[in-house]
Amino acid sequence: MRPRAWAFALAVIVAITAPMRAQDLVSWEELLDGFDETETKYLPKKEDAALSALIETWTERAERNGGKVSRAEWEKVGGALLEKGRAAKADYRKIMATDWGRDALQIAIMDRDEVKNRLSAKAKFRTRYHPPYVILVQESEEWEEHAKAAEIAGYLAGVRAAFKAEVLDPLGRPEATKPVPVVVLASMQDYEVYCSAGGGKGMGQLAHYEPSNNRLVIHKSCDMSTVLHEGTHQLVRSTVRRPLPWGADAFWFNEGIAEWFGHARRVETKDGVVYETGLLDRNDVDPKNATYSGRLMTLEVLRQGRNPAWKDVRPFTLADLIRQTNDRKDAYSKEGIEGNARTLAVYSQGWFLIYFLNRFDVTKEGVVKFGVPGRYQEGWKKFLAATLDGAWNKDLFEKSLGLPPGGMTKVSEEFDLYTRFVWRKIRKGHVKDQRLVPWTDAVDKDGKSIGKPEDDLLRAPESKAAPKTPEKPTKKS
């Protein structure tokens, strides 16, 4: 092709592509459409950092190019990320436009300032809103704050749903909807610093709930059961219509119901995740567990005095248990190892008392029933309703169960016998899926039957030891 032809072709290409390039170049400010680069914090940490870096780089690039950038090129490298950031920001603003959001923001600001004062002015937190929970997660290079907040929110939403289905709905009670603060610290060390700066509240524990400000305080190493346990305290306190002073409240009830929901099992179904309550402690039913971590195992060790460190501490009688208040909890915390053993007994027996009220029934022949509502279940519901009204007192238990004069003695005996019965069945292996089974369904790992009719008697059959052979008399020398 002659030179003049080349020049003509080149001119045509320039003429065609110039408008296209001009149309592709847009104002960088217009492309951001008012997006504030400081608000990339609503994205997960890695995406936040990536989008922040991109915006900074492209802002400098636009400044060198008269404020213009290529729309097509930007869409390839940052468009999707920017839209995700915009969506997260829009969700945040939507929440903040509600009464709940405005209250939540105030709580987040106040709690963040107080927590930073206890830790360090350098401590940083990211706030994530999962209504009704306001979750403040301490920033750390060791974790993704966005993901941790979502994990904790998932656990709390699960126990909230279980509490609603098992407690609120049957009693006709509404859910508490006010913002609920949750602080997630980056380590056990930071948790201890926080507790120490707050006068020691929570020291020696894995996590705790603060009734005075409705705040749940946990840390990175807390497992699901700890989150559920403390989250239940938060749910109960938020539901009580006229809360009693903390020290006068029922120790056994608060810890028992927190254990009841705290040891729920997380199950994934086709309809979503559900949390099953009322199961036996997995540490009790695991034959390989040789520690005292199971709740019934703890009671058996106390009953038999098998731990020398706990000396003469034994499980409480039912009458003593139901009169335990939070003032006693404070007193036990100052009694060293023995006080710790008494606290463990209240936690374990509090949980088992709820299990007993919902499960226990027996035939006239003394055979324990399975898979039916407990004979005291309706009494438990009355007790629960009155307690959530704020009407708890030391006589409420007997009144709720409608016991006649002397009836407490009978219930106390049943409670003690049933505690031993359940432990006996566990040791015999009469457990399936963390539930007791009747002797007819008890099998070993090979499917062989291991049960006998007498295994389901509330009172253990007396052992028939062989009579001793009388010794021959010896002559005195």
Image: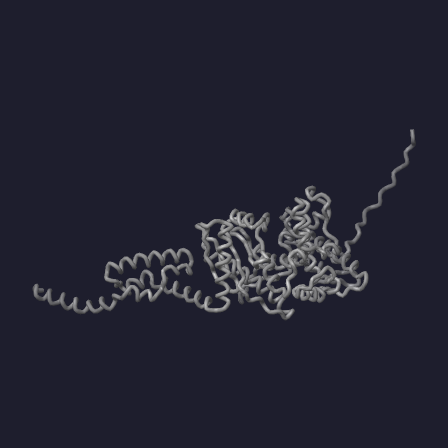
Taking 333 as reference, is 108 left or right?
Answer: left
In the rendered structure, the answer to whether residue 59 lies left or right of residue 306 reads left
Residue 299, visible in the rendered structure: yes
Q: Looking at this view, is 130 or 95 the one in front?
A: 95
> Residue drawn at (73%, 59%), measured in percent from left and top?
394
Which quadrant, please, contains the C terminus? Answer: top right
Question: Is residue 272 or residue 309 the one in the foreground?
Answer: 309
Residue at the limit of the structure toward the top, as seen here: 477
Give the image location of residue 392, x and y in percent. 69, 62
Q: Which residue is drawn at 47% across and 53% down?
A: 138
Dividing the picture into quarters, in which one does residue 352 lie?
A: bottom right
Q: Which colour scheme is used?
A: one colour
Drawn side of residue 380 relative to residue 157, left or right: right
Q: Nearer the viewer, residue 21 or 232?
A: 232
Q: 178 above or below 295?
A: below
Q: Position of residue 262 (x, y in %)?
A: 60, 57
Q: Quick one: 312 or 195, which is closer to the camera? A: 195
Q: Position of residue 329 (x, y in %)?
A: 66, 52
Rendered location of residue 469, percent (x, y): 86, 41
Residue 280's image quarter?
Answer: bottom right
Q: From where the camera sits, is residue 432 visible?
A: no
**Quadrant (top left, top right, bottom left, bottom right) of the N terminus:** bottom left
